[in-house]
Each structure stands twice: as structure tokens, then as C-alpha cells.
Image: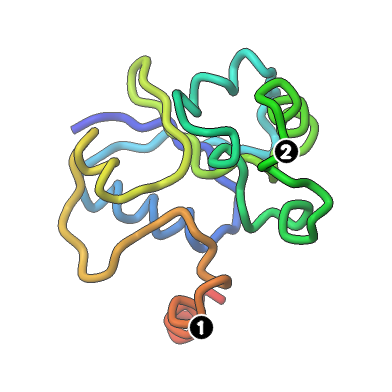
Amino acid sequence: MVTVVFWEKPGCAGNARQKALLRASGHALEVRDLTAEPWTAERLRPFFGDRPVTEWFNPAAPRVKSGEIDPAGATPDAALALMVADPLLIRRPLMQVGTRREAGFDQAAVDAWIGLAPTERPVTDQCPKDDPSHAIACRAAGEA
């Protein structure tokens, strides 16, 4: 399979499930701390491709959820400046295989890109604490 450079927020249960799925699919991971990486706008921009700026942001980031930051009103340059200053704003995980870079974890897209093992429940880039059914499953699994 492939080696995936995987930038995560340490301790994130969603990222833990994503890594488990990638490993179960035969991929090797080079895991990095998203919040400790020395990001620049130039390094970060390629992860978002042609997605709209609103999709660059982590919708569960405290500053987004509180309304302090409105992704819909951000220009690309402003969004990158905000994310460089506060990496928790970045939609995660960030992944790189070879020269291709992606942000977020859309299971179907990742499967089409590098291949994934089948799962009973979809794995996404949404925080499980935002979905009551996932939160219940996480508590039962001890992931809260």
C-alpha cells in the first residue's frame, strides 16, 4: 500500500478512528501534530485544492462554533493567515501521499484515492461529539 503523512490533533477520537481505518487498509502512517507544525500559507494552501474557503475550516473549532470567525466571510489569504496563527481552525486531518495533499476525511474520496478496507460505519472528519449517535458509541468504547 502507501505511506500517508497524517497531520492530526493529538487526542482527537475522530483522528484515531481515521488512523485505525488507514492502518487496517494496509497503509503505513507518518503521524504528525497539526498544532505543532510550523505552517506557512504556502505550505498549507495545496491541501485545499479547489474547495471553497468555507470547507478549509474545521467547523468544530471553538472560534468557528462561537461565531468569532465566519468562514463564509473569509478570503483565501485571510483564511490562511488565520489558520497559520491558529491551527485548530484547519479542517483535519491533513494527509499527503507523494505530492498529493488533502484536507478532511471523506471516506469515499479517500477510498477512491488510496483504497480503504470496508467498514460497517462510515468514518468522517466530523467530531464525534457533534453527533449524538457517535458520542454514545464513543462513550461505550471508552473514547469520549
Q: Earlier in the sequence, mark 1 or mark 2?
A: 2
Looking at the rendered image, the quarter that the C terminus falls into is bottom right
Q: Position of residue 73 (x, y in %)?
A: 72, 38
Camera-near label (1 vs 2) is 2
Left of 72 or right of it: where is 117? left
Relative to 75, is 67 above or below?
A: below
Left of 103 or right of it: where is 72? right
View extreme (right): residue: 68
View extreme (front): residue: 73
Residue 73, label in figure = 2
- Identify the residue at image location x=53%, y=44%: 92
Along the line of sight, the residue nearer the viewer: 105 or 28: 105
Relative to 86, is 67 above or below?
A: below
Locate residue 12: give its quadrant.
bottom right
Left of 55 or right of it: where is 113? left
Helix, strand, or loop for circle 2?
Answer: helix
Residue 10 in sight: yes
Amino acid type of the residue that numbered disc 2 sits on in the rendered structure: Gly
Give the residue pinned by disc 1. Answer: 139
